[in-house]
Amino acid sequence: MDVIKGDMRTGADAFGRPGEIVSALLHAAMFVRLRLGEFLEHYELTEGRYSVLTALDKAGASGLSQSEVADQLMQSESNISTLVERLQRDGLVNRRWSDTDRRKRVLLLTADGQQLLHRVEVARDRWAESLLSRMTPEIRQGLTLGLCQLSAKAGSLQASDLETGNHAENAVSEVESVWPVHPNSPHFALEQMLSTLGISGRLVEDEQ
């Protein structure tokens, strides 16, 4: 919290400086990811395994190929393979031929995988609610909208835009197409913070 305390000593205007905002986000994300890792440890999961289970759950009965999981999580297939092997050993994921394309093998949640993910999601709602408990609905809504705008902007930027400032006028309009705003969801703002600041960037670090 030294970064934030330092800002307070320099006056309220410090919170409006772009560099200070990014620093505060990174500082918060570091602690959120630490606490998230501790939470998932109770279920013998990591961020990476949890992300794979969530992607497969959203895919439903059609499943996903390993390359499709890699694309969704922005990881290499070799990284995803490491995670999938562990999930298969634990009986949470299995692999079979696709019902719609017999040339493709897909990954699906097992019954145990579905049950575990449901337990984690229920507990995570409570965990996220406790994390955001001191924020009023107005603050949560503002945080969510701000994070969505940041994600939309970051996702649309090219390297050259960082120098020229192009596309600034598009950031707000892109929000609706990226994520709808659901301020009443106890962990929506948390999800956007983690997504914006790269929750998928270190998915396999703890598997190696």
Image (spheres, grey):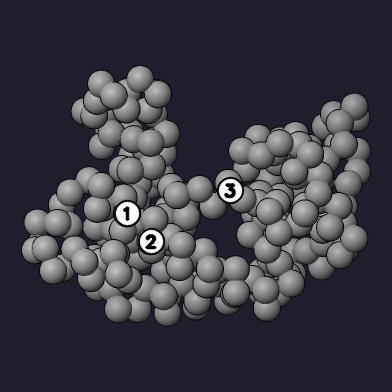
Q: Quadrant of the C terminus?
A: bottom right
In the rendered structure, are the residues bearing label 1 and label 2 in contact, judged by CB atoms less than 8 Å apart? yes
Q: Residue 140 occupies which quadrant of the picture?
A: bottom left
Q: Nearer the viewer, residue 203 or 87?
A: 203
The amino acid sitting under disc 1 is Ser
Secondary structure of the residue carrying numbered label 1: helix
- Tell me if mark 3 has few (under 14), some (14-19) or many (20+) residues whose alpha carbon lies within 10 angstroms of its own: some
Q: Percent position (x, y) of residue 151?
A: 38, 42
Residue designated by label 1: 23
The residue shown at (31%, 58%) is: 24
Give how far apart the Cα atoms at labels 1 and 2 are: 6 Å
The amino acid sitting under disc 2 is His
Residue designated by label 2: 27
Secondary structure of the residue carrying numbered label 3: helix
The residue shown at (76%, 57%) is: 207
Q: Is residue 51 above or below residue 131?
A: above
Residue designated by label 3: 200
Q: Is residue 174 above or below residue 142?
A: above
Question: Which of the two discs, 2 and 3, sits closer to the camera?
Answer: 2
Q: Quadrant of the N terminus?
A: bottom left
Question: Which of the two discs, 3 and 1, sits closer to the camera?
Answer: 1
Q: Residue 97 occupies which quadrant of the picture?
A: top right
Secondary structure of the residue carrying numbered label 2: helix
Q: Nearer the viewer, residue 22 or 39?
A: 22
Give the side of residue 16 with respect to residue 24, left or right: left
- Tell me if mark 1 has few (under 14), some (14-19) or many (20+) residues whose alpha carbon lies within 10 angstroms of its own: some
The residue shown at (43%, 47%) is: 196
Mark 3 or mark 1, earlier in chain: 1
Q: Percent position (x, y) of residue 102?
A: 90, 30
Q: Percent position (x, y) of residue 134?
A: 30, 78
